[in-house]
Image (tube, rainbow, N blue to C red):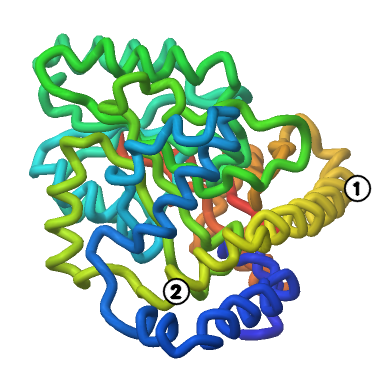
Amino acid sequence: NPQIISLAAGFVDLQSLPIRATGEAVHEIFETSGEARKVLQYGTTIGDHKLRSLLIRSLERQEGAAEGAFAEAVDRTVITTGSAQLIYLLCEALLDEGDIVLVESPTYFVFLGPVETRGARAIRVPIDDQGLRLDALESTFQDLERQGLLDRVKFVYTIPEHANPTGISLAGDRRGPLVELVRRWSKKHRIFLLEDAAYRGLTFDGIEPPTLWGYDRDGETVIHARTFSKTFSPGLKTGYGILPKSLVQPIVDLKGNHDFGSSNFNQNILAHAIEAGKYDQQIETLVGVYRSKRDVFLQALDQYFGTLRPEVSWTSPKGGLFVWMTVPPDVDTGFEGSLFQKCLAEGVIYVPGEFAFAPEPNPVPRNQMRLSFG
């Protein structure tokens, strides 16, 4: 229904899509027949080498590292059909029935699907306004060890920047300690830390702390996942992961079974955009667009819900696309609840918060909602 005001899907702003930058990249590719034939041919399963090299060089600049400091990571970088495919492949590679994944409470609800498909368990770990609570994660590990289940924990999943669905970012002083905590609990087998950095770069206020990946000294704990869907164009459906060495071949083998490699054409469009500086320009544009949207959205919430505080509360994100709202416990925000039905009658929809909670360890709250200002 095109008349619906959707505060639900995390769609990007339609008017901000990089039409000119993409068109110019395609034109440059087709200026010479040799390059055009190259991009219209099959690529490699792991992904275009030039694009992977550009991504690692970009990460060096973001982390303040010298050029070439992360060069070895090029061979550990796998291009995927969006970060969603990477998540699916990781679940396929790492999870057996009865295995455990520790997730933020709440978490990105789409992530829970592949975990459930593998027959694995997703267990919630509380957050606060600074992101994942390290004391709660430590306590969860201790409880699982007492139950004899520590060997079933395969990875921890977190969204450090402007998390989906809460908009909350992991505090800078928790990042290094989080990597060390996960490393310390890898007692008999490697427990991985999956860093979903989908919204990195889309920071409106302040400076982004270093990535979790940057704290992983030996490169064997953190899986750094990224996508171009939020920072450039979802239509190109391209993402990537920087993997520990032990995971590269298993993920490449599984990806080969899926698709022989992501779109070679789309990868080359992105490589041209990055090399020409147009990707960074697009992010700068998006930060301005989304900052304005965020400000308008928060002003409207304060205007229309301010008198209902503290019974009604919401997050104030410093980036990304989402606001997380909590209403009184007796208000059911689910699809069958009266609030959703009344919103729908007014032509407005949102995502019920219940979908963003893993099923364990206790009943899921039903009085929250994810609101997207994208």
Cα separation between marks 1 and 2: 43 Å
Residue 253 in picture, x, y percent from top left? 12, 57
Does residue 297 sit above or below 363 in this rendering? Answer: below
Q: Which residue is mark 2?
A: 266
Along the line of sight, which residue is nearer the eye, 135 or 83?
Answer: 83
Q: Quadrant of residue 4?
A: bottom right
Q: For residue 17, say whether it is visible.
A: yes
Residue type, label 2: Asn
Along the line of sight, which residue is nearer the eye, 57 or 102?
Answer: 57
The C terminus: image quadrant: bottom right
Say few, some or many: other residues with alpha carbon within 10 Å of mark 1 (under 14 / 14 to 19 / 20 or more).
Answer: few
Does residue 57 sit above or below 64 in this rendering? Answer: below
**Mark drawn on residue 189:** none
The N terminus: image quadrant: bottom right
Residue 54 in picture, x, y percent from top left? 48, 52
User: Residue at left 58%, top 59%?
Assistant: 274
**Mark drawn on residue 303:** 1
Give the tally of numbered discs.
Answer: 2
In the structure shown, which secondary structural element does the residue marked by tag 1 occupy? helix
Residue 171 in picture, x, y percent from top left? 59, 22
User: Residue at left 15%, top 42%?
Assistant: 94
